[in-house]
Image: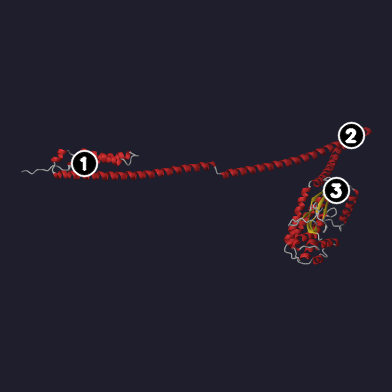
Amino acid sequence: MAPVKSPRLNWPNEEVGQASQAAAVATLATYIASDDMTGAEPANADERCSMTTESNQPSAGQEDSLPDNAAMSASHGEEDSQMQLDDGLISAAKEQDSSESQSGRANSRSTSSKFANLRAAFEKDTSTDGPPKRNFARSAECGRQCQDEIGKLRDERDREEEMKIALEEKCTKLEEELEALEQQTRGQKEAGRLTPGQETNGTNEQDHEEARAPTAQSDEVHLLQQQLAELKKTISTSTRMSSSVTDSTFAQEMGVLHHELQNWIVLNFRRAKMDVAPNELCNRLEGTGDFERVAWLQQIFRVFDPSAKLAFLQCVATVFLMDVFCAELVFGLNEGEQWCAVLLKADDSMQKTLGSQAYSKWRAATVEAVGQSAVFQDHLQKANEGVADSICHSLHKLTEIDAGEGGKASLIGIIKRAASLAHLFSFQQAQYQFILPNPGTPFDAETMEDIAQDGEELSSSVISCVTFPFIIKNGDECGDNTHLRNVIMKSRVLCREVES
């Protein structure tokens, strides 16, 4: 018998493999195309795969005709194809997951890049607008421009004022010159009518004289006008200085002088040890000045209080500083000089002869003229140094402390300030009095101010020492109404309780 050929057993496996591949491709395409149904895709793919596998499986008659080994091989082929399909689906799902993760990272990168682009655009727009500092710089520049413009306008205003004054003076000169020429012309006409014979005898000679006369008269008028202008300037300067200072300004300047003197005492003598008996201090004052001054200071130091030593030392300096404000006519005149003695004698005569207002004007003009002299400035410098020497000498004898050259130099500066204020007071038409209350005088709240730090009000208090005088103004700014009395500045005093 011829051998029986076994049927081809690989057919079912091939068809099953092709069907499985087609189903896997279709499932992958559907999985990729769908975005929202990721979890449902594998189930649909399994159904499709099972349906395709069932359609491709042989019928029941064919299975019966096949031998057992063929059926077994077919069943093994189906299992292999099923396993291949499952592996394909798993790999497809992994690829899809990897693609989704890559797309997510790409989306995050694109989102980050978009944020970066928006930030760059915002910063660019902000930078083009300009930082706020530039606006501040512009405003500052505008402010400087406004200040410069204001300065230019002020300068222009000052120039216009000067031009106005110059034109007014020139106009006054021209008017006076014109009036003088008119008077001369009228005089010549009257002289011509009185002597007609001179016109026929010397016509040419008269013409030459008339031609030369206006030139000489013009020079003469110009010289007189210059002298008149200088005189007006001097008068206006004296008047301006006499009316330019108010009472509040004087009070403020004198207050500054008081504080400067107080600071000088504290700076140079705060470490002084004055734990000695009052009688010893009174003995040390011997020889520091004239008899009246020493007696006045000894009366102060008989009630010396060591806790207020700086106030007592300032009292010594103030006593010598009173020479600046109470000098005759003006501080700095040396009676040993002849011209100074004559001027002081004239001042005494004018004060007795003239009224108060006229004397004030004369005094202001005299002090202004004397103050511009270089000789007087030398005398004033020596007088300032003399007051400083007296103060330093007296304080050295009381405290045994030397202020030194630096301390003396600063004290001379304070005395110069006091001398300038004294000269300014002398320019005023009102009368000013500088009064230093005597020790033991009852306290007067109208003219005195207690410098005690504790601020206790004493029922019956008297003055222990005085650190600065009080100033009284008699009369008004014009020197009239001398019955008017005004306290410009109160004296600084230290009080104590009266012993019962």
Image height check: is 35 above or below 348? above
Q: How many marks?
A: 3
Where residue 288 appears, as percent x and y from the top left, is: 82, 63
The N terminus sits in image quarter? top left
User: Which residue corresponds to the image point at 34% horizontal and 44% vertical from the top-left?
Assistant: 99
Image height check: is 413 above or below 50? below
Residue at the left extreme of this rendering? 1
Q: Left of 68 or right of it: where is 425?
A: right
Q: Which mark is residue 360?
A: 3
Residue 190 seen anywhere in this rendered image of the structure:
yes
Where residue 332 appears, as percent x and y from the top left, is: 82, 56
Q: Are marks 1 and 3 in contact (CB under 8 Å)?
A: no
Labels 1, 3: front one: 1
Q: Which kind of residue does numbered mark 1 sit on?
A: Val
Q: Which mark is residue 386?
A: none
Image height check: is 26 above or below 342? above
Which badge, 1 or 3, is on the more N-terminal residue? 1
Could you give the CA–CA distance between mark 1 and mark 2, rounded to whole angstroms? Answer: 155 Å
User: 60 or 125: which is nearer to us?
Assistant: 60
Instruction: Assign a secondary structure to mark 2.
Output: helix
Residue that label 1 marks:
16
User: 494 or 120: which is nearer to us?
Assistant: 494
